[in-house]
Structure formats: structure tokens, C-alpha cells
Image (cartoon, coloured by chain):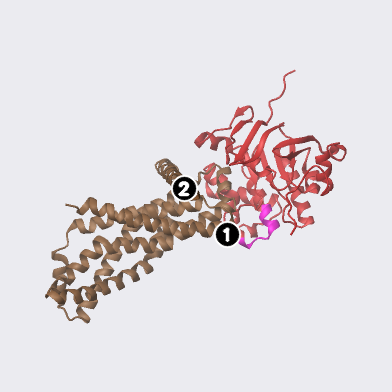
Chain colours: A brown, B red
Amino acid sequence: MKLLVLIGRTVLHGFETVGSLSVFSGQALAHGVRPPIYLRLIGMQMLEIGFYSLPVVGLTAIFTGMVLALQTFNAAARFNAESTIATVVVLSMTRELGPVLAGLMTAGRVGAAIAAEIGTMRVTEQIDALTTLSTSPFKYLVMPRVIAGVTMLPFLVLVADIIGVMGGYLVSIHKLGFNPAAYLKNTFDYLETMDVVSGLVKAAVFGFLITLMGCYQGYHSRGGAQGVGAAATNAVVSASILILAANYLITEFFFAR
Amino acid sequence: MTRATPKIELADLHVAFGANRVLQGLDLTIAAGESVVIIGGSGSGKSVLLKCILGLLEPSRGRIRIDGEDVTRLSGAERQTVMRKFGMLFQGAALFDSLPVWENVAFGLIQGDKMARPNARRIALEKLAQVGLGADVAELGPAELSGGMKKRVGLARAIARQPEIIFFDEPTTGLDPIMGDVIDRLIVKCRTELGATTLSITHDMASARRIADRIAMLYQGRIVWDGPVATIDRSGNPYVDQFINGRAEGPIQMAVSAA
């Protein structure tokens, strides 16, 4: 009997969370299309989410590109297909690894920071203070972050794609002895616009999910430092899971035959 | 003779969080220009009451009227228009960490009233001077201020838009007695200068006596006594007597578990 109660409670809590998140998303989007638009805050968030995430995304991309080249060479050598390395690296980076890794790394860095900042504002009554000063927390706190996330993640992914391909190039040329001109030719010959565009669409969706989950968890945090800590953890975990789930759906939308 | 419309009118207000019924049919009327202090123990629902009036919490039942207008379930632009009448000093001051002191004070002017930043800064400096803080404080961050200075900045922010109604949530909590007296005097001074209606909540009786025209006692979600500050010592109400004398024995039973 206790097991049934536990299952029922978990299911109800799940529905409650989905409902609450849907209302939150709706409010965030509704506020986003009505003035005032806080351009200064959007600019600051673009700097925070985009520019300051460049080192972590860049490092992740370059090592991933390097490992990808090594692993592909190792595997392709078994059936004499070493020349496919350049194509495998560029397609893997642009279609999958660039967006997903940049998304996950940004979720860890930005999602937690957003949840912690807004969560602290919640428990110290700063969000209530905003309301008493005739300012909507959705417009002032949520929308600048969501807009910055949606616009800056594609930029980060584009940089990750370029750096990742460059990592694969460095290993292939300097360690595996490939011809630079042939490697570059193989890289661009099989790359199609849709490979890059699908990755950028994924990035925009991931940016929305990361910032939305950070804002949602922070906005609903309760109970002081422990609550803020839990909000930061939940923001990263929920954004990561949603990124992976959304990644499958978008991939199916673009590439399923 | 017609009766003047009350500034704030609360009728049969109920608020519950799950099974915890915090307000249970609260009635309170505050006239324009009056200073009312609500006293009551920790967890008695004083802060919840303020948040209900401000629209931060929605009551499950009852009516809230401001200047005769029902504001119980206002939202969006209508709520923001009503909020223009209010100023609020939060218990922990609730200053925005990311902004310097002057922008905290000018926040409502810049964001709410769309005032140009140079004008808003000039007014912020005037308000800071009004609460005894110099221009040298204006560029500091909230983290660089003492508790008393934070309260003063919070007070300057609360009065910056010249509100008709000001709420004070535990204005002297966490301050030494001298700074508490300073804050109380500032509250009385600001209220007199603005001619505002004020509603304060506290369990500091010395503070309540200094700033109130009228005191109301909140217990178990209802107002159990309401009268002029001068009569509180002879209220004849056992709840009030126990509270103002700080006695453990009496009708108010605190949830205390012995180790």
C-alpha cells in the first residue's frame, strides 16, 4: 500500500512540475514580446552566457575534436577507411558533439549560476522588492537571460564546431601524418549547409532550455542556502536531461528518413 | 456626515499553505495618514499579511481594498499601477546586490516611472541625505554596508517615489537599540514629511510605541485587539498583556519542545 502511495505521489508531483513549468514558460514568453525590453540587461547576459563561456566550450571542443580524430583513425584503420577521418570529425562536430557538448558545458556553468543568483534573490526577498517597485521579475530577470541563451548558444556552437574541426586537423596532420590540403578537401567536400544549420537550431533550443530551467529552479527555490544549492543542482540536472531528450527529437526531425 | 473611505480595508481575509491556516478571517481598516503597527509572535502571519496586500500572495478568501478599490486579485498592468502607491522596507532591506546604492534607491524611478538616470540619481542622493547617508555611500555596493546602513538605504528606496502607503517589515530587527531608535525616528520623520499611511509589523514593543498611532495584535490568524498606542498598557486583553510583558505564562502557547 505504501508503495502505491509513493508511486501516486511521485506521479502527481511530476504532473504538478510539468504544469508549473508550462505556466512559467508561457509567462516568460508572454513577457518577452511586450515592452519594456531591457536591452542593457540582455547585453550583460549575452556577455555572461556567450563570451565568458568561450574558454570552457573552446577547450571541450578542441580536445573532443582531437580524441575523435584519434579514435576514428584507430577504428577506420581496421577496414582501410582512414581517409574518412576528416568527414567523420566535421559531421560529428557540427551535427552532434558541438551542440550537445557546448549545451552540457553551458548548462553546468550558466544554468547553475542563473539558478543560484535568482534563488538568492528569491530567499532574500529581492524578487518581492522588484514587484513592489512596479517591475516584473519575468521581464527584468527571466527574459534577458532567455533571450541571451537563445542567441548566444548558436554562437558558442559555431565556435565549438570550428575549434573541434581544428583539433581533429591538428592531430591528423601532426600526429597521424595526413596531407593538410587533402584533409581540408575531405572536410569541406562532404559538409552540407544542413549539417551546420541543424546544429545551430539545436543550440538555440538548448539555450532556451538551459536558461529557462535555471530561471525556473531559482524562481521557485525555498528555504535559504540549502534551497538555493538544491535549485542550482536541479537546474543543471534537468537542463542536461532535457538537452539530451531534445537532441534526439531535433535529430529525428532533421535527419530521419 | 459621510464616512471617509479607508486607505486600506481588509475583510475576512483567509490564507492557507496546505493544512497550515495562517490567516483565518482577518479584518482591519486603516485610515489615510494613520500609522498602524501590527504586533504578534513569530510565525503568526504578520509578513504573510503584508505580502497579501502587496499582491505577492493570493488570499484564498476575503477582500483587500485600497482607496475603496478592490485589489484582491489584480494582476499585470493593473497591479503595477496600484503598486505605484506603495513603498516597502523589507526585513533584510532586500537591496539588489548587483546595483550600487544609488541605483537601488533610484530603481523604482528608473524602471517603474521611466525617469532619466541623471534625474533619478539626483533624487536618490536627496533621499539618501534624508536618511542621514552622504553622497560617498552612493557608489558603494550593498555588501559594503552595515546592517543599519542597509536599513537606511532600504528606507530611502521605500520613500523615493513618494508613496501614499509605506509598509515596514520588522524595521528594527537585527539592529542595536540605538540604531533601532535612529531608524524609528527616520520612519516617523519620513511619514510626517510625506503624509503617508504606514503599516508596520514588529515584535519590538519599544519600536511599536515609537512609530504607532494605533496597535493591532495578531494571534491565530485574527486581530484579537486593536486600539490607540496610549491604551495598550491597560488593554485588558490577556493576549496583549502577555505579549507586551514578554511572559511565557498566559493564553499564548508557543510551540517549544524541551530537549
- The kind of residue on which mark 2 rests is Leu
Chain of the residue where label 1 is placed in the rendered structure: A
Task: Give the label, 1 or 2, closer to the camera.
Answer: 2
Tell me the element at label 2. helix
Q: Which residue is pictured at 22% across the width and 81% down the height?
A: A174
- Furthest residue toward top: B1
Left or right: A205 in relation to A134: left
Residue B82 image point, x, y percent: 58, 35
Would you name the residue on which mark 2 appears? A4
Which residues, given as a range, are shown in magenta?
B143-152
Chain of the residue where label 2 is placed in the rendered structure: A
- The kind of residue on which mark 1 rests is Ala
- In this view, the residue in front, B68 or B202, is B202
Separation of disc 1 and disc 2 at Cα?
33 Å
Q: Are marks 1 and 2 in contact (CB under 8 Å)?
A: no
Would you name the residue on which mark 1 appears? A225
